[in-house]
Amino acid sequence: MPPVDRPALIAVDGRSGAGKTTLALELAALLRSHHTVAVFHLEDIYPGWHGLAAGRQRYREKVLEPLAQGRRAEWTAWNWNTNNDGERRVTEPAAIVILEGVGAADAAARGLLDAAVWIDADAGQRRTRAIARDGAGYEPYWDVWARQEEEWLAGDDVAAAADILVRDSPDALSPAAVLQALLNLPQLEPLLSLERSHPALPSLQVEKVEGCPDAADLFRDLYGSSSHAVWLDSSNAAAGQEPDRNAVSIMADGAGSFGQLAEHRAGMTTVTGGRVSVRIRAPFFRWLDSAWGAASVQVPEDFPSDFALGWLGCLGYELKRECGGNDVAAATPDAALIFAGRGVVLDHQRQCTYLLALSDAATAEEASEWLGRTQSVVKQLAARVQPADSGTPAEANCAAPAFSLRDSRDDYQDKVRRAKAEIREGNSYEICLTTQLAAEAAPHHDDFGTYLALRRRNPAPFATYLKFGDLVLSSTSPERFMSISPDGWLRAEPIKGTRRRVDDPAADAALKAELAGSKKDRAENIMIVDLLRNDLSHYAVPGTLQVSRLCAIESYATVHQMVSTIDALLRPEASRAEAVAAAFPAGSMTGAPKISTMDILDRLECGPRGLYSGAAGYFSLSGGADLSVVIRTLVRCGSGLSLGVGGAITADSEPEAEWDEVRAKAFGVLSALGAVFPEDRRPAGPEGH
């Protein structure tokens, strides 16, 4: 037959007995709702029990290469009864061809495939399944075949290269979950547009519970054992400042049927739901647009938040590579998020609690059980009389961590001078220079206890506790990076200008007044306001951009801060994810103009910032988002602790004063840990004290 349009080629690979045939056939049945689908089985072409390598070559030459050119594949089947070549067969290039078998996605084949699925299953289960399927005749050859698989896989890590990884028992494979994973692959977007345009949307259940329990106790009881959980904590709710930043706290994990985990590193987002992981080789903000871009759930009336479940987590500063910055690698992920299909919202103003859960026909019972169980916990804790201070001190049984500096005092002040030289040369007019403090965590470091100490010492409207396995972020950020309401209003609230608070009321008031009148701090703040006005204008309805507050002073437990507010209305046709990308990283953490200044910072700073200077918060199914700037934040990655600090450098900056600002910003976190600034640490005496 003459060549036709090239089919989409999807390989399903794995060791013998992994369940490839079952998955391929059931996946083909699902895809046939909208497409013509052919299935090719590699076992039909292997030349005998010793023929894995030769069979993979036959498969590539006789089947895969013709199909990849849009031609029918004409090949010779193997006759397992006579142990010789058998009949001639043809595989037509349907819209989709699923190629299943050991070696379907080997290194030589992958360049011709549109997607590769690898099934990783238990060896014992695989043997039992394979022999049950193929009969006792396979049993004598199991070890022969297994050795060929091991020899091949020793030099070809198919699992690491696959687009989709299925970790499962062969008897519990989910073709629907694999199809959902295929829908996430950019290379299959045009082909699977019908499936993508008619997703099965779950409904949102919301239950209101009277009473607002202690948030720390509630998080501990509900999510203390979760490996991946987020607490967006308005820990200064009682302060009463700016209600939209203090009204609610949100907590959730990635558990349940709808739960997912997403991690982005260097151009690839890995999304895991249950036992299926999909690797999306595309920019992060492109993936975010497809995963979150449109509202799919309506916020109930009289609900106190725009959060109606969705994605929660953090974005690292090094995502700047997608926003005009250089490509710099960090030890931490460029983004780490959970998808919460159920969660809790604490309404601090009305003293009540909301429980949220997604459900459909298949998960209604699961949602009902979770709602009932969680309601009982909330009611029990709400009835408990709280002590004056229920937090537990960090590192209660451990020595305070001993931090070291990335830059010494002299080194940092020299960088301030170099930054000022860049400004004099016209390469920037404000450079937000940062440095890092690092320490080894104690062997039994208590992440949650550390966070409770931080929030007690420095309560903040955008405090965040995020745990992603061996990555933990404990933040007491006072700064909003950006919010988007479901109806499209954008808001940014940059902070520039800081004074450390003191105990004496008169002296403290004088510091606040001095900050309010500081020409230098006002200049820094206004420069960033201008930058953010530009960032928001790219996707704003003309005429809606406004500066609602300019250089207002807000006071927190350890510092006074100068804050401005910029608002704009998002254009109806604009991408919400692209609007976030246009403003990322926060201008208050780069300086201006942003792109050239980020380039200068890469030259001045001695390493990546990681999560520090990035953003943390949520992207909700309502279309709403609320993200803080990751500052005043302790990050644990493995056994390492890090704390980023810095300040804005302008033409009239004084190096000594900038170093003092670094110390002031580090104080809140260090004091909560019982630690001291590195240059203040006394050497150990002869007795080790």
Image (tube, rainbow, N blue to C red):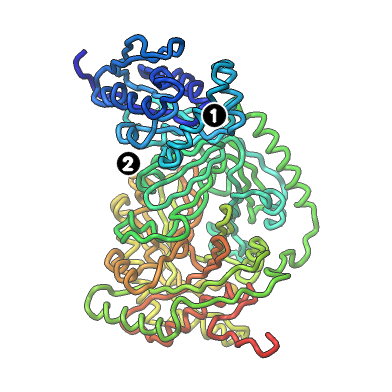
- Dot 2 falls on a residue whose secondary structure is loop
Residue 26 visible, this orientation: yes
- Reply above or below: 517 against 37: below
Q: Residues within 10 Å of mark 2 (few under 14, many from 20)?
A: few
Q: Amino acid at mark 1?
A: Asp
**Residue 544 position within the rendered picture, expressed as x and y whole percent measured from the top left:** 33, 54
Nearer to me, 395 or 119: 119
Could you tell me residue 393's position as x and y percent?
A: 70, 69
Height in image: 464 above or below 290? below
Residue 462 appears in the rendering: no
Residue 432 lies left or right of residue 271; in this view the side is: left
- Quadrant in which residue 138 is drawn: top right
- Judging depth in this view, the residue of 512 and 590 nearest the camera is 590
What SS does tag 1 mark? helix
Give the farthest residue toward the left. 2
Q: Which residue is mark 1?
A: 143
The disc labelled 2 sits on which kind of residue? Answer: Glu
Q: Which residue is mark 2?
A: 573
Q: Earlier in the sequence, mark 2 or mark 1?
A: 1
Horizontal and vertical percent for residue 344? 63, 47
